Image (spheres, grey):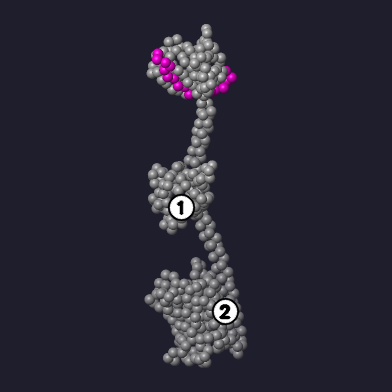
Amino acid sequence: MDHSQGAGSGPFKFADHMRDIAAIYSLRDGRFHFLNATAEAILGIPRARLLDDAALLLPLIVDEDRPVAAAFFEKAARQGSAEAELRIRRGDGTECWLAARAFPAGDGDDLRALICEDVTERKYSLSLLSQSEKRFSQIVENIEEVFWIVAPDGTQIYYVSPTYEKVWGLPAAELYRSPFKWMQVLHAEDQARVLDLVTRHLAERPTEMHFRIVRPDGEIRHIRCRSMPVWDDAGRVVQVVGLSEDITEEKRLEQQAEESSRAQRDALVREVHHRIKNNLQGVTGMLRNYANQHPEVSGVISEAIAQVQAVAIIYGLQGRPGAVRVMLDDILKEVASGIGQLMHRVVKFTSDEHYVNFGVVVSEHEAVPVALVLNEIVFNAAKHAAPNAELAIDLKIDIAKERASLTVTNPGTLKGAGARNGPRGGSGLKLIHSLLPRRGATFELNESKGSVVARLTLEPPIVSLKC
């Protein structure tokens, strides 16, 4: 048979330069009337043989795809046009994917043109992409973090992993419709800070932020969110990817550890305070014995005992189980009771009953100086008051000015008026002024209607008012 026409000569010579298989076959006899050179290169069979026997094509088709090929040729014969993708196995054993198209060739009804494109590389790429997407889905759908991809300005959600629904308690479909829905459940205290970070820095640089969300069931979750912008070849940010992790349990364990550590520390501090108080009480006991044995110095010893007792009071208050604050009225009561017993005096302590629900907390760092100042004021009042005179201690709270005023009144008169309010005067006054904190404390000593009035005013940072 003369195959000069079928081998791509004459007007069909151009077809030999095509990258795709080009052929014309007859429905009447099932033979190829034309095949280009590319057919031989892709199929691996000399085209002269295929032109002699078109049946040689069938064994090349992979078994699983032969029904596809049969349906393709049947549709082309019946409807004139058809499309299909199928595999062939070439002579060297390699497989090749072909995208085939058939359509009428000429005016007659018995000829069909066939174009077959080698799409093996595209199929391979799509297969790799499909495998990659499947692995990606397996990863992001099974990790505990919420994986997300958004537009640089956050106005469009490209992807959010299913874990979002578990953590936020909201449907993911709702987030795709309303991209800022995740921010609407932010804890009120975190909203402004997170909004500032998102609007100013999300598309600029890698960002990490911590915030709380309030789920629809009212549960508060702690979230750690890390994000990174993605740039294209031109250096433009095209999207932002991130991971949002629920760290609620981590926060709970941290808080639990902190509370445990704080409890251990507080227990140790209380034990130390308790031991110091016991040791100071031992010192006061020895001083009392010495004073009893040496009456000539009992006055000086009594003053020393009162000062040691004042320090012991603070350590005793701080060493109480559950003690977290040192209250001013507790110090006053202990100081008044101790000096009353030491000096055999009646000390009457009163506080403003209108503010019984308010407490005056003394700064931990100033508790000892305040106790010593109070001790000196009460001790001096007891020492200089007339025998059997009753001492009155009155505590008032000024809520508006956040301060407390302590007044100690005893019948008597002042000696040396010029030394009343300054650091001059007796050793007691000098000690008071030397102990007074530089900020938040003032002391006055005045005479009024036959009584000596000592007033100590304490303000922040020395004290704070607690309801």
> In the depicted view, which residue is nearer to us: 93 or 26?
26
Specify whether residue 56 is painted magenta.
no
Residue at image coords 56%, 83%: 431
Locate residue 351, reporting x and y percent: 42, 78
Query: Is 122 located above or below residue 81 in the figure?
Result: below
The disc, 1 or 2, on the residue closer to the chain's N-terminal end is 1
Can residue 377 be seen by looking at this rendering?
yes
Q: Give the range drawn in magenta.
A: 90-108
Residue ID for mark 2: 308
Locate residue 254, reporting x and y percent: 52, 56
Query: Is 325 located above or below residue 261 in the figure?
Result: below
CB under 8 Å between callouts 1 and 2? no
Label ID, residue 199: 1
Element carrying mark 1: helix
Element carrying mark 2: helix
Which quadrant does the C terminus fall into? Answer: bottom left
